[in-house]
Amino acid sequence: MSAPSGRPTTTDPSFRIAVVGDTLLDVDVSGTSERLSPDAPVPVVDVRTDDRRAGGAGLVATMLARDGHDVVLVTVLGDDARATEIRDLLPDVTIVAGPSGAPTPVKTRVRVADHALVRIDENCGTPPVPAVGDDMTAVLDGVDAIVVADYGRGVAAAPAMRSALARAAERIPLVWDPHPKGAAPVPGTTVATPNAAEARRFVGDVVDGVPFATAAAERLVETWGVGAVAVTLGDRGALVASATDGNRFVRAPSVTAGDPCGAGDRLAAGVAVALAAGSDVAGAVADGVAAASEYLAAGGVTGLFAADGPAPVAVPGIDRDAMRVVHEVRSAGGTVVATGGCFDLLHAGHARTLSAARALGDCLVVCLNSDDSVRALKGPDRPVIGQEDRVELLLALDCVDAVVVFDEQTPDEALRRFRPDVWAKGGDYRANELPEARTLAEWGGRVVTVPFHPGRSTTRLAAALAAVG
């Protein structure tokens, strides 16, 4: 997996990956708007930035190159200044391109602050299927995996390219990101990754959710003759169907996401890398979903290209979600409640305490001792359950809105990050005796105790389990 910034971690293996498909020029125009035009009731945008990047298959190639892989982009390009600009925007990618016979397509998005105002498409009609040269197909023989990024402009529909891709699929992983106006994946494709809207256009159903995704994926596996189909479901994850392993749902991590541009490309790229590393399809899709979630959490395409400067500081997703929850509750005039503890081996006492704490306000943030913190407090045999699982168990409770993990022996620094209005703690002691009381007083917060339920103890439960074992 790559770091959320788009840079590879030091332990990531590097592969030679071919990206086959249609390349566009993407332009993001951002600015401010404080007035309407005198000519019509439309906003006037004062442009602040004009950012350009290779789009379509070019964006997939960019992502993989920034992850440290050796990338060859197999595409077609026009004979114009914008095609030259695309080449200049891909200095770390080997480009093997034939003539498109058409002007370079350009998609310009105009945004004001974080809101999309309009998208302007130029030369984005469907051109004739381009000719594919031997140089374009020959490079497929020397790669570890292939991603087909079909944007409906004909590269993946060319007969010579389809024959070469079908041959390649017999020996290496092939991930196909389809387009409703494009060609069907070649038989033998390892996994195709349509999103729900694309899958609906392929199969014609109008229902939604996991039942639709399951039926669509199963039907497309049979129709296309591919190994598996992963229907992506946005922030929910993906539903994977294969002829050999049945259906599997891959849940997406919870992240705060804004602009979704490029998330499908990031997923397909992540799946291809995982397959090249030897993962099975379900595991590869899980890696792809995680990569897409990290990409969105790091700012999407904006965060990807911010990697040209200093690497951004990665904020743990659980902390980021907590800050989002706190901001939303405060903006609505609500009360933020926090509580804390190890929560190792959840039991009824924990559930009652958490439920009572949540009733004190409009959201509950749990400050959770990390594994290192638990060991320092409880000894080398604790925790029984690792922090990632403890986070997941807590978030599965309806009364818990967010979790923040801290490494210290007390949650004081974590509390200072989001300054709850109330600190709730279960126990048979007085609120003013709690060590967090002084910290809450720094911003006028209050400490409240909730009913203590004797006889429920993680230590006692752990001992009982050890005796049984």
Image (spheres, grey):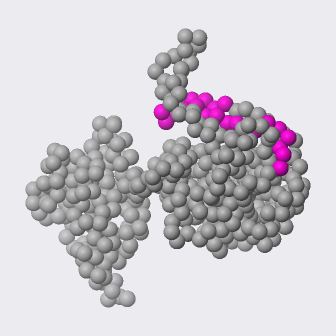
**Which of 71 and 130 lies nearest the eye of the viewer?**
71
**Which of 90 and 380 lies nearest the eye of the viewer?**
90
Q: From the top left corner, tell me how far across and down residue 321 is, in percent.
A: 40, 51
105 up-or-down from 191: above or below: above
Which of the 4 image quadrants contains residue 177?
bottom right
**Which of 432 and 173 lies nearest the eye of the viewer?**
173
Q: From the top left corner, tell me how far across and down residue 282 is, in percent.
A: 63, 68
467 up-or-down from 193: above or below: below
Q: Is residue 255 visible?
A: no
The secondary structure making up most of the magenta span is strand
On-image quarter of the C terminus: bottom left
433 up-or-down from 459: above or below: above
Residue at figure coordinates x 70%, y 63% from the top left: 17
The reply to whether the magenta stretch includes residue 117 is yes
The residue stretch that appears in magenta? 98-120
Q: Is residue 103 visible?
A: yes
**Which of 130 and 380 lies nearest the eye of the viewer?**
130
Q: From the top left corner, tell me how far across and down residue 105 is, in percent.
A: 74, 38
On-image quarter of the N terminus: bottom right
18 displayed left or right of 456: right
Residue at figure coordinates x 51%, y 24% from the top left: 46
Residue at figure coordinates x 59%, y 63% from the top left: 68
361 displayed left or right of 202: left
